[in-house]
Amino acid sequence: MNKRSEAVNRALDRFLPPSTAKPATIHKAMRYSLFAGGKRMRPALCLAAAEACGGREEDAMPLACAVECIHTYSLIHDDLPAMDDDDYRRGKLTSHKVFGEGIAVLAGDALLTQAFEIAAQSRGWPRYSHQQIILELTRASGSLQLIAGQVADLEGEGKRVSAKQLQFIHERKTSALLSCSVRLGGMSANCTAAQLKSLTDFGYHVGLAFQVIDDILDVTQSSEQLGKTAGKDTAAQKATYPAIVGLERSRAIARKLTNKAFAALRPFKGKAGSLEMLAHFLLERQN
Ligand code: GRG
């Protein structure tokens, strides 16, 4: 993972305008959040999915970087005072704390746009055209998925949210982009329809497990460990798995979802070792 993370950082550095490009403030702000030390889980999943389908890292890399840009944009905007209002992210001050709210909004906008510029530089594959790649990214990040999850999350604050509504939020806010990451990895290897179906199934379950674990970590870990303010979900009366079903049941749900993700990889007959390792890492992670 560390080796892949370094390769992703080098590629992101190549794809992004230099911090000296005018106006320097926006490029500094984009790079500040992008290189603040994220786990690079989505690129790792994308590259591992490509590997499972016999693809090459260099073909998957633009798509892995595009997804990371979308993810970072969503974090910058989520931390804004108008949303979750957080001072720390990835162990550093949030974008609006360093650059002010206006530039933070624009840095998020610029990273979202940058994602499509990077994805458009992928090579295109016999089964998956650029159009399909762009559609994949727009669907995962649009008003029916990522933004839908964020809206439902905002509207659910301080209200009683059922387990079903919580799943709706998690599927969109978290699982959609994780699923998109593995699907794009498969597409970059020109995967078959059957492989894409297995990857989708894997991404959906691993994505949900990821968010259940995120909810658990918010109440069990310190702010130092998380690199962001711990206990915020409880303070904001947010709907989370531990709040609705308790910690022990939440842990059992995360294990069950991870097992379903493992099951989705069976058709790869041992070629999806990196994806299995990542699912295991996500279940056991402490931040
Ligand atoms: C503003 C459109 C918009 C969406 C925001 C990302 C997000 C949606 C909200 C942030 C809060 C949150 C709990 C989101 C769920 C996804 C998630 C767990 C993000 C954190 O991902 P990590 O742990 O972060 O992979 P790093 O920093 O390691 O990349």
Image (cartoon, rainbow, N blue to C red):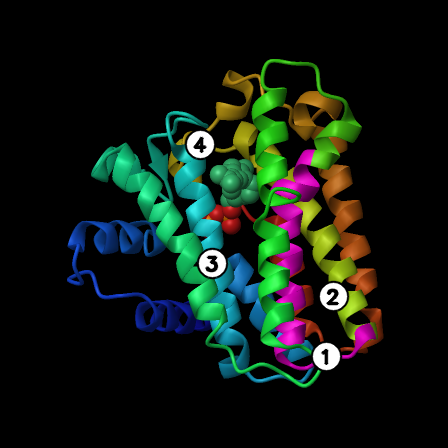
Instruction: Answer yes or no: is residue 1 visible.
Output: no
Callouts 2 and 1 close, C-beta under 8 Å = yes
User: Does 36 sit above or below residue 117?
Assistant: above
Kindly identify which numbered label has been placed on residue 68: 3
Label 2 CA crowd tier, 10 Å (few <14, some 14–19, many 20+)? many
Q: Which residue is drawn at 24% across and 56% down?
A: 27
Kindly identify which numbered label has been placed on residue 40: none
Disc 4 secondary structure class? loop
Instruction: Answer yes or no: is residue 153 visible.
Output: yes
Label 2 amino acid?
Answer: Leu
Callouts 2 and 3 close, C-beta under 8 Å = no
The range drawn in magenta is: 169-193
Q: Does the numbered disc 4 mark a residue whose Cβ is under 8 Å from ligand 1?
A: no
> Whole-Å distance between the Cαs marked 2 and 3?
19 Å
Q: Which residue is drawn at 48% across and 24% down?
A: 232
Q: Residue at x 26, y 41 (%)?
A: 103
Callouts 3 and 4 close, C-beta under 8 Å = no
Q: Nearer the viewer, residue 104 or 278?
A: 104
> Whole-Å distance between the Cαs marked 2 and 4?
33 Å
Label 1 CA crowd tier, 10 Å (few <14, some 14–19, many 20+)? many
Horizontally, residue 287 falls left or right of residue 129, namely left
Residue that numbered label 2 is attached to: 199
Q: Does the numbered disc 3 mark a residue whose Cβ is under 8 Å from ligand 1?
A: yes
User: Does 21 sit above or below residue 60?
Assistant: above
> Whole-Å distance between the Cαs marked 1 and 4?
41 Å
Residue 22 lies in the magenta-colored region = no
Residue that numbered label 4 is attached to: 222
Magenta highlight: main SS: helix
Label 4 amino acid?
Answer: Ser
Residue that numbered label 1 is attached to: 191
Label 1 amino acid?
Answer: Cys
